[in-house]
Image (tube, helix red, strand yellow):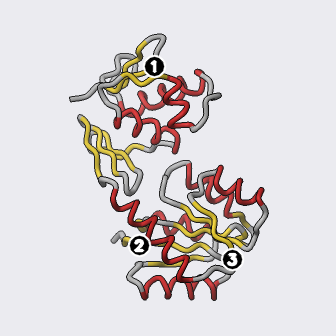
């Protein structure tokens, strides 16, 4: 049976992880903790989590590496918690997909406030979007096509979400570079590869797409009722 948790703490300092976990539970934040990256990945295979608190130093592994691995398949909010305070560490954490950076030692009350803000934002998003035979579960960052689960990489998921949010409207390449990739220097080649992969995963015939239409010289149109 799959269990649902508000928060998963990933920290090799077991006493701190356990204390933080118990504190969050006192305020109705259903939480659990693990002490390694490997245990985190195992936990996520069998449970649903709305938020991850992730330490950078995890014994023989790195929270940075774990974040990169998670971002391949999920957009679950990740708040880094670390005693490391250099600007470079903070920038790395945010640039690889972290949503915030909290320095140790942290105030449990401040941490609780940040966690509740993220959870409220996370839970306010419409949980499921249905377009044609495509179903997006925003809370779990998963997609089903015709009832069949489809694996998307992080950027593919972001791209599909943006196209669906703007369905039946021509979206320019520059708009996609700016709002999906977050920059203006991503090349056409990168975008074309992601569009091709999306079509292969969601279209019955990728060569004659039902949903993602190319508007030559401009961008793309996600066509749906």
The span from disc 3 to disc 2 (Cα, nearest Å) is 23 Å
What is the tally of numbered marks visible in this picture?
3
Identify the mark nearer the N-term, 1 or 2: 2
Residue 57 position, x and y percent, is: 73, 70
41 sits to left or right of 137: right
Q: In this view, does 30 lie above or below 177?
A: below
Question: Where is 200 relative to 145, above or below?
Answer: above
- Residue under numbered circle 2: 5
Q: Going 51% across and 70% down the picture, which residue do you hit?
A: 114
Q: Is mark 3 on a helix, strand or loop?
A: loop
> Is 92 above or below relative to 56?
above
117 or 79: nearer the eye?
117
Quarter of the image with the C terminus is: top left
Residue on which the image places disc 3: 104
**Mark toward the start of the polypeptide (3 vs 2):** 2
Mark 3 crowdedness (10 Å alpha carbons): few <14, some 14-19, many ≥20: few
Give the residue displayed 64% in from the left and 51% down from the top. 96
């Amino acid at each position: 049976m799959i269990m649902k948790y508000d928060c998963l703490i990933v920290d090799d300092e077991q006493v701190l992880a356990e204390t933080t976990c118990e504190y969050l539970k006192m305020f109705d934040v259903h939480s659990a903790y693990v002490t390694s990256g490997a245990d985190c990945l195992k936990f996520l295979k069998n449970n649903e989590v709305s938020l991850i608190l992730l330490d950078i130093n995890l014994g023989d592994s790195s929270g940075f590496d774990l974040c990169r691995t998670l971002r391949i398949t999920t957009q679950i909010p990740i708040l880094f918690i670390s005693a490391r305070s250099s600007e470079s560490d903070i920038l790395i954490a945010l640039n690889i997909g972290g949503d915030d950076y909290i320095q140790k030692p942290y105030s449990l009350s401040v941490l609780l406030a940040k966690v509740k803000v993220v959870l409220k934002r996370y839970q306010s998003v419409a949980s499921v979007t249905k377009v044609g035979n495509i179903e997006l579960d925003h809370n779990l960052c998963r997609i089903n096509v015709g009832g069949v689960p489809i694996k998307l990489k992080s950027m593919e998921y972001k791209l599909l979400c943006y196209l669906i949010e703007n369905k039946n409207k021509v979206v320019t390449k520059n708009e996609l570079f700016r709002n999906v990739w977050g920059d203006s220097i991503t090349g056409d080649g990168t975008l074309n590869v992601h569009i091709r992969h999306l079509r292969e995963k969601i279209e019955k015939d990728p060569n004659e797409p039902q949903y993602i239409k190319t508007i030559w010289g401009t961008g793309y149109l996600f066509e749906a009722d």
